[in-house]
Amino acid sequence: MEYQHGGDIYGNPQIELDYSVNVSPLGLPEGVREAACRAISESSRYPDSLCRKLRWALGRHYGLSWEWIVCGNGAADLLFALVNAKKPQRALLFAPTFQEYECALRAVNCEIEVCFLQEEEQFVCGEAYFRQLESQKYDMVFLCNPNNPTGTVMTRSQVQRVAKLCQKQQAFLVVDECFCDFLQEEEEVTALPLLEEFPNLLVLRAFTKLYAMAGLRLGYAFCRDAELIEALHRVRQPWSVSHIAQEAGLAALKEKEYVRQVKDLLMQEKPFLESGLRALGFLVYSGRANYILFALPKEKREEERKQPYLYEAMKEQGILIRDCRNYRGLDGGYYRICVGKREDNQRVLAALRKALASLDTGTKE
């Protein structure tokens, strides 16, 4: 089976620098590491299957009822649990976007409609999406905000507009905010304040990206529909969130200075990386998350459609980037990279320059 996501360092042991995944470049916070290590000595007992202490802490952190929260073994665990609990018959996605929505929906034989975001509009969600949502009947609608892999952001008023349309046709709205933590304007973007108004809304988040906790697997979701929260607890495996992950999550919520440092680094390094990509001749799409979608010029994409030469050329230099050809709406020639520390960003740009030179001189064979 072909690996479908970034981060396949296990299938590529020669990789020294993984830019295919979008986690904090500062690594696991020391307080989180210490909490996880302490929790190992307590792991002879079962974890709390209801994650009560962590849910209470999340409720206090966000100023919401802890009873509105459910935790899972990463956001994907909750995504599949939600679809299994609701069993929608017809759903709407836009494309390109995170692939696991479609995977989860197909697992329950749901019919999937797609609204394709346009490259000429920088993959921004526009009026065509709202027209499609208004003109059709759906059971479930997914938004990724910021969107993966484009990094584009919908305003809260846009999300509220979607929520109202969904409420009108009795559709359930899922807003995936797993990258919202990286935004400087997070409080103005997040849909969490809309939960009180819309019981048909679920907001999905995770510790994975901001705190570099991908290997610990810890996600959480908010919804004020008590029946749905209960249903999610029923369909989930009872001990899917380990004691180590729960303790790490509690520690992560205290890492205020770490979060500030991550956001400051992103503000400094993302423009540097985007400028470097443009100087190399790539088309760069203006997203606002902690990753960058870019593409080869259109005249150079034909060969990339047949074989991901740029991907392979970077891998030969020990760097893994995300080939986006398996995203709906994208094909060969589109790539995504994370934003890292300056020395790593410089190394990536130098490797891309070398890779492009080898493609231009025909030495890729």
Image: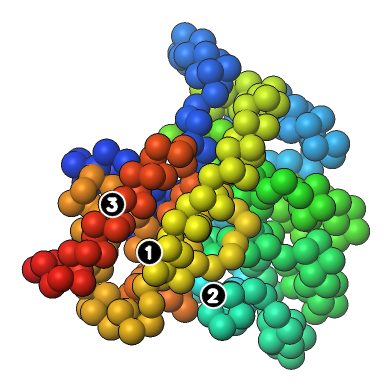
Kind of residue indicated by mark 2: Ala
Residue 175, percent from left and from top: 69, 59
Q: Quadrant of residue 285?
A: bottom right
Q: Earlier in the sequence, mark 3 or mark 2?
A: 2
Q: Earlier in the sequence, mark 1 or mark 2?
A: 2
Secondary structure type for disc 3: helix
Q: Quadrant of the N terminus?
A: bottom left
Residue 294, percent from left and from top: 45, 66
Q: Earlier in the sequence, mark 1 or mark 3?
A: 1
Q: CA distance from mark 3 to mark 2?
A: 29 Å
Residue 238 is tagged as none
Dot 1, crowdedness within 10 Å: few (<14), some or many (≥20)?
some
Quickly name the residue at label 3. Answer: 351
Secondary structure type for disc 1: loop
Looking at the image, is 7 positioned above or below residue 60? below
Q: Is residue 81 visible?
A: no
